[in-house]
């Protein structure tokens, strides 16, 4: 990667940070398009494993971005770029949204009774839901969208069914997410997914 590529990566994550309404995970489809499809900086497997590993690990939800940056750096062939990739992606995703959130939360709290503020909050709800649905779609289709030959070996429909079942279980039960991750890992381990 050239210096201009690192700069472009930083600028892209700065932009994504301002779009991350509902959390950084809601921008996952755009990260997939940018990192995997457009620039080929990550493989499909690296992208999905970065998200899965970070979701299974304790700690902030945004750790998957650090893993993506680490993998981008490692894919350059020089291990010294892995911390640089982590720093660039985390700085890009955290700085604008944290600054904006801090200032907007202070202003919104001060003006919480204004009709425009309440309408804005209600209007954001469908956007967040749509972004989360797009994220689920990308993650459920991930392993079969990289090439047509892999789609023949691993069709996406079992992942879509698994995603729908997990969404129902999370919605209707209090089962911990780690159990669902363990079941999914077991099904993947034995080749059912």
Image: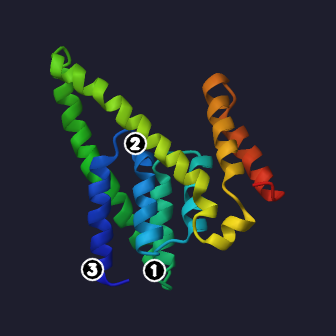
Residue identified by numbered label 3: 4
The span from disc 1 to disc 2 (Cα, nearest Å) is 29 Å
The span from disc 3 to disc 2 (Cα, nearest Å) is 27 Å
Label whose residue precedes the other's in the sequence (3 or 2): 3
Residue identified by numbered label 2: 23
The local crowd at label 2, few if under 14, some if 14 to 19, many if 20 or more residues have their Cα within 10 Å, is some
Label whose residue precedes the other's in the sequence (1 or 2): 2
Quadrant housing the N terminus: bottom left
Residue drawn 27% across the image and 48% down it:
18
Q: Position of residue 169 (x, y in %)?
A: 67, 30
Residue drawn 44% across the image and 54% down it:
29
Q: Horizontal placement of 185 versus 116: left or right?
A: right
| Residue closer to the observer: 12 or 89 | 12
Residue drawn 46% across the image and 41% down it:
132
Residue identified by numbered label 1: 80
Position of residue 182 relative to residue 35, above or below, is: above
Quadrant housing the C terminus: bottom right
| Residue closer to the observer: 151 or 189 | 151
């Amino acid at each position: 990667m050239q210096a201009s590529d690192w700069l472009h990566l930083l600028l892209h994550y700065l932009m994504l940070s301002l779009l991350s309404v509902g959390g950084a995970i809601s921008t996952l489809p755009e990260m997939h398009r940018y990192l995997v499809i457009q620039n080929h900086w990550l493989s499909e497997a690296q992208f999905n494993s970065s998200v899965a590993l970070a979701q299974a690990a304790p700690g902030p939800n945004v750790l998957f971005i650090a893993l993506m940056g680490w993998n981008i750096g490692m894919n350059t062939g020089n291990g010294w770029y892995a911390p640089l990739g982590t720093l660039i992606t985390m700085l890009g995703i955290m700085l604008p949204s944290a600054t904006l959130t801090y200032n907007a939360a202070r202003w919104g709290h001060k003006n919480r009774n204004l009709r425009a503020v309440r309408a804005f909050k209600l209007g954001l709800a469908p956007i967040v839901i749509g972004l989360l649905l797009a994220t689920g779609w990308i993650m459920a289709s991930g392993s079969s969208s990289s090439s047509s030959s892999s789609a023949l070996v691993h069709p996406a429909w079992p992942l879509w069914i698994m995603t729908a079942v997990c969404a129902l279980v999370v919605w209707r039960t209090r089962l911990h997410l780690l159990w669902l991750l363990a079941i999914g890992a077991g099904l993947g381990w034995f080749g059912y997914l």
